[in-house]
Amino acid sequence: MVKKMIYAEYRGASIPIEPWKGVVQSIYSKAVNLLHPSGNLISIVDSIDNMTDFGLVIADFSLLISKISNSSHFLWEGTQITFSDIIVDISKALLWSGSLVSNLIELPINIKPIQKAFINFAKEEGLSPLITKKKGNMYSNAAVKIINASLGSADVSREALLIDLSKLVGLGIGFTPSGDDFLTGVMLYETFTGINLINRKSLKVKIPGTTEGGRTLLILALGDSFPFYLKQFAESILKESFSPIEVVKKVLAHGSTSGSDALTGFLCCAKNNEKIFFT
């Protein structure tokens, strides 16, 4: 029987090219996750909106998930992924990178309308109460305690406040725990502004303790690479004219609370950093 061939439209910049074998780790409505021997998840996704540097966008996602199941075996051969009934060809896929085009450094941006939009539209779950000041939950309350304790023991190095937020790694539930999404938002702010705030070395030590999804997200963020939706947010607010409500809503629409938690981390930095470049 001739196997059906489908084609990848985009491939992430960190996608491995060396051959390897594995099984399908998990299947969702918008993503198929493959566990690489390194421990990172390679995600085959339905659109560029769900892209990361470990991602592949394919043209016919619905066909793929109709042909495979959890624990389906595959062979990754660099230019194609061979399953029992279908082949994904990635040889002509366009390269995509989660690195930001630029940072703002000296470009002033009014952060207050973004914060206002977040307060008005953010979900109450996850860590959003850190910004909205609405009634907290067990995870947001725990995060406040961790952050306050960390601020009290921060070290000053090279004029940068290096805060140990490693206890947030793995905090929460879901594919990517709230603490991991929050930390990704913090690192987005760091990369965006060029300001060092947290101790990234301490985060690396704790990464094995979170979920596979959270681990993959944090590993990319530690390398200043971010999911499509966060890269889009950062680069959208660099434009001379942008809609705070529109860009915030796009972030909040990602995942159950992932977008909300990531933007909480970003806004916490913008709100509290004394060296902020925002007006």
Image (spheres, rainbow, N blue to C red):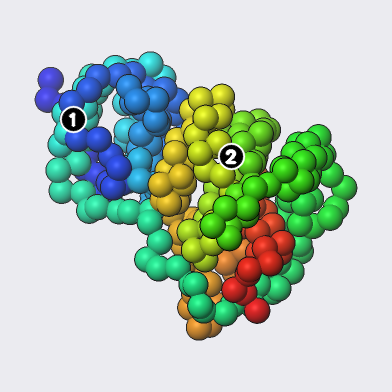
The three-letter amino acid code for the residue at tag 1 is Glu
Return the disc, 1 or 2, that comes first in the chain's sequence: 1
Q: Residue at x 15, y 36 (%)?
A: 79
- Graded by Cα atoms within 10 Å as few (under 14), some (14 to 19) or many (20 or more), the crowding at tag 2 reads many
Residue 150 % position (x, y): 72, 43
Instruction: Tell which residue pokes out farthest to the bottom in this image.
Output: 240
Rendered position, 96 above or below 201: below
Q: Residue at x 69, y 74 (%)?
A: 113
In the shown orientation, is residue 63 left or right of residue 6?
Answer: right
Label 1, secondary structure: give it: loop
Rendered position, 239 above or below 140: below
Report the residue marked by disc 2: 180
Q: Residue at x 41, y 47 (%)?
A: 223
The three-letter amino acid code for the residue at tag 2 is Asp
Quadrant of residue 38 within the rendered picture: top left
Q: Which mark is residue 233?
A: none
Task: For the residues labelled 1 and 2, say whether their Cβ atoms are less than 8 Å apart.
Answer: no
Q: Quadrant of the N terminus?
A: top left
Report the residue marked by disc 1: 18
Residue 272 % position (x, y): 72, 61
Residue 253 visible in the shown view: no
Residue 15 % position (x, y): 28, 39
Q: Residue at x 77, y 51 (%)?
A: 130
**Separation of disc 1 and disc 2 at Cα?**
28 Å
Q: Quadrant of the C terminus?
A: bottom right
Label 2, secondary structure: give it: helix
Foreground pick, 35 / 14: 14
